[in-house]
Image: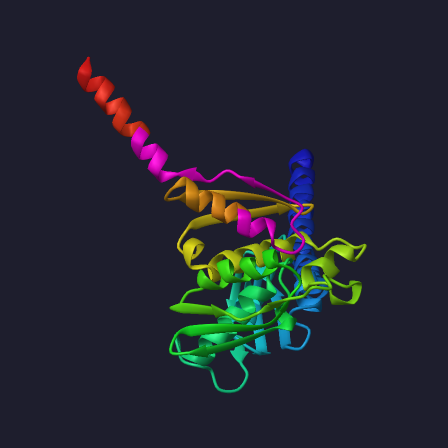
Amino acid sequence: MQKTTCRLALMVTAASLFLTNVPVFASETDNRIESSAKQSYVFKTYLKGDDIKIESKDGVATLTGTVSGEGHKLLAQETVASLPGVASVDNKLVENGEVPAVYTDAWLIAKVKSTLLFHRNLSATETEVLAENGTVTLRGEATSSAQKDLATEYVKDVEGVKALKNEMTVSTAGLKSSEKTIGQKMDAVGESIDDASVTALVKVTLLSHRSTSALNTTVETKDGMVKLGGKARNAAEKDLATKIVVDVPGVKSVFNNMTVEEAKTKETKTKKAAIEGC
């Protein structure tokens, strides 16, 4: 009888300790989520001008406040969603000022500027973007013909762009140290970009391109090394995803493990033909 009583006492004590520690553990995780988000590279650079409040409860992060545009709202959500311990994100952020209607020229300009901003080899701040009835015009100075051609390739692939006029001039002086692109400046900084920020930048960049926005792509980042998963319709789409991701700030290397549906279809047909021929 005495042994049974002791066992019951021990079980009650253990249970009470467990129940006491659960809220403490959850609280520590939530505090870490909130702190990590505020200290992330994305929040300290791209979103530093926005008024974003983060509150986490049991791994559910709620974002409130205001941001300058749709791209910032999505970037904030993807960054927080990529943090360890986050179960889901409730994005209640509101855009400042008047929100341009989808596919209008104002909306298209913001979309193109955002796309240019997320590529390390382009200088978004030095590029003027104009739009009229879906036709985008780029002006400014490119550091090389290669940079100008890259801007053309990327902007043509932005959703909503019907035509492009690249009127950028190529500098004969080359790229000065004070005129580095945003991505190059990031690379020059000693500290590495946190993995959550890299994952968010990769996801938003893929979504900003027409050729990769519909792809079912998963993104995982470890110490700047990005692993892509999911499906691509063909080898060209898979290669394009790699090319785009390599040019995202903070990405050190890319492992593209996406499966090609076209190749799988051919393989299935070959196997089927072999079986039927038996």
Q: Is residue 88 left or right of residue 45?
A: left
Q: Quadrant of residue 140?
A: bottom right
> Which is more toward the observer, 80 or 201?
201
* In the depicted structure, whether residue 69 falls above or below residue 240: below
Residue 154 image offset from top left, x and y in percent: 50, 60
Tell me what residue is drawn at x 47 percent, y 82 percent: 99
Residue 258 shown in magenta: yes
Where in the figure is residue 86, as x and y percent of width and height?
Answer: 58, 56
Residue found 42% across the figure and 55% down from its top: 211
Q: Is residue 58 visible?
A: no
Residue 157 falls in image quadrant: bottom left
Residue at (32, 28) in percent of width and height: 267
Placement of 183 over or under 238, stated as above or below: below
Magenta-drawn stretch contains 82: no
- The picture quadrant where one finds residue 79 is bottom right
Measuring 66% from the left and 38% from the top, which residue is drawn there? 7
Q: Which residues are magenta?
A: 243-266
Residue at the outermost front position:
172
Measured as percent of width and height from the top left, residue 114 is found at: 55, 68
Q: Taking 180 as reference, is 13 above or below it?
A: above
- What quarter of the picture does the C terminus occupy? top left
Foreground residue among 217 and 183:
183
Q: Quadrant of the N terminus?
A: top right
**Nearer to the camera, 119 or 203:** 119
Left or right for 100, reference 50: left
Q: How is the image coloured?
A: rainbow
